Amino acid sequence: MTPPAAPAYRRLSVEERRSQLLEAALGLFAHRAPEDVSLDDVAEAAGVSRPLVYRYFPGGKQQLYEAALRSAADELQQCFDEARVGPLLPRLARALDRYLAFVDQHDAGFSALLQGGSVVETSRTTAIVDGVRRAAAEHILSHLGVTDPGLLLRMTVRMWITAVEAASLIWLDEDKRPPVDELRDWLVEQFVAVLSVTADRDPQTAALVRALADDV
Amino acid sequence: MTPPAAPAYRRLSVEERRSQLLEAALGLFAHRAPEDVSLDDVAEAAGVSRPLVYRYFPGGKQQLYEAALRSAADELQQCFDEARVGPLLPRLARALDRYLAFVDQHDAGFSALLQGGSVVETSRTTAIVDGVRRAAAEHILSHLGVTDPGLLLRMTVRMWITAVEAASLIWLDEDKRPPVDELRDWLVEQFVAVLSVTADRDPQTAALVRALADDV
């Protein structure tokens, strides 16, 4: 039996429509600063009517930006999902590969979304971005098998995450040099290096560094 | 001859008055988020009339915030001034001491001013903060005697500066632990460690690391 032909036009569910609009907005943010993206632009990019976009984002540009940031944050957090099997550093390298692919794909939109400093910056958007940083730190500590990280270890991990973020922004500014594979390996090496420095001051980190050295 | 007694009330110059008001504002930012500081609060803290504050900052809260940020940025940049004599790492340690003293003194105001993410954040304030970061990187490269830094060296220095900034914010959050001397030494050690990692990928950085090792 032949299945009935799909209708040429299908009414999207609320969730599907919302995703479609956010996808269009993220596409626009990749080439323009958030404050330069209007709801009309989103309507045009998504091929829908303006009133429809206004119905989904009655709060206007700010609401659209926050929703897009939240959607990007969710996508970013999925980069950190990594099975808890095999040696640790290759796991970190794989998570970095996914993260850098996200940065590469969203390009200028990544800077605009995560760097803040636009007129649409608010404490809510800062909280979303900080949530991603916190999630990244928790993922790393959990992969390291640490349930009760001390101050120096927590600081080390958070400082490295900030450095990775800075590296991504500079990388985009520098026409994506060095090549992404080199950047990823270099970031992993920096992680081991800063952990090793902390190890001299902190027994918990010292134990981790020994475990990493044996973990091949 | 006895000098004439100073008058009980002296009319301040425009520049002196402005400095007095910014000093009062910075004091308030140290305990409250910028968006919670009104011009009236500044008038009260400085012990002057409200119309006077409004005369100096007709642009209101946003203008006051930007002026305070610029004043703090100038003060911060002075932390980096360090004579080009003696071994390099102690120079870096002394600059960090001054920077951390600034962070310590301004406390919550430092987070509020430099972390951004408040409702008064704009691309102009971001540019001020980025200017401080850029100045810090230039100071470091100039002390290292590098006039034409390659990509990896520039990235390493900027990543370390971002990590130092993150460390300062966490340090304030963590009731100023670890002790400031330990934090300063640890940050210097991290600088050497990340440079050493980069040295394996970059001949320019490798030459610097060798010079640092001989520089005692």
Image: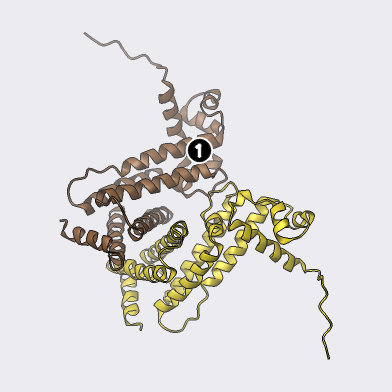
Chain colours: A brown, B yellow
Q: Between B179 and B89, which is closer to the camera in this rendering?
A: B179
Q: Quadrant of residue A211?
A: bottom left
User: In this view, which residue lies farthest toward the top?
Assistant: A1
The residue at the point 74 percent across, 60 percent down is: B47
- Look at label 1 and name its amino acid: Tyr
Quarter of the figure with residue A213:
bottom left
Q: Is residue B63 something one can see in this rendering? A: yes
The residue to which callout 1 is attached is: A65
Horizontally, residue B70 falls left or right of residue B139, namely right
**Could you tell me which residue is drawn at 37 percent across and 55 percent down?**
A158
Instruction: Judge whether residue A100 can be spotted in this image.
Output: no
Residue A149 sits in which quadrant?
A: bottom left
Q: Position of residue A141 (x, y in %)?
A: 29, 51
Q: Residue B151: image x %, image y %?
A: 38, 63
Q: Position of residue A41 (x, y in %)?
A: 53, 33
Is B105 located above or below residue A134 in the figure? below
B39 lies left or right of B82 = right
Quarter of the picture holding the N terminus of chain B = bottom right
Q: Name the image quarter holding the C terminus of chain B.
A: bottom left
Please count the marks in the image. 1
Q: Please, which chain is the residue tagged with disc 1 on? A: A
Residues packed near mark 1 inside 10 Å, few (<14), some (14 to 19) or many (20 plus): many
- Which residue is more in the foreground, B195 or A40? B195
Locate residue A209, reporting x and y percent.
23, 61
Element type at mark 1: helix
Q: Is residue A80 left or right of residue B134?
A: left
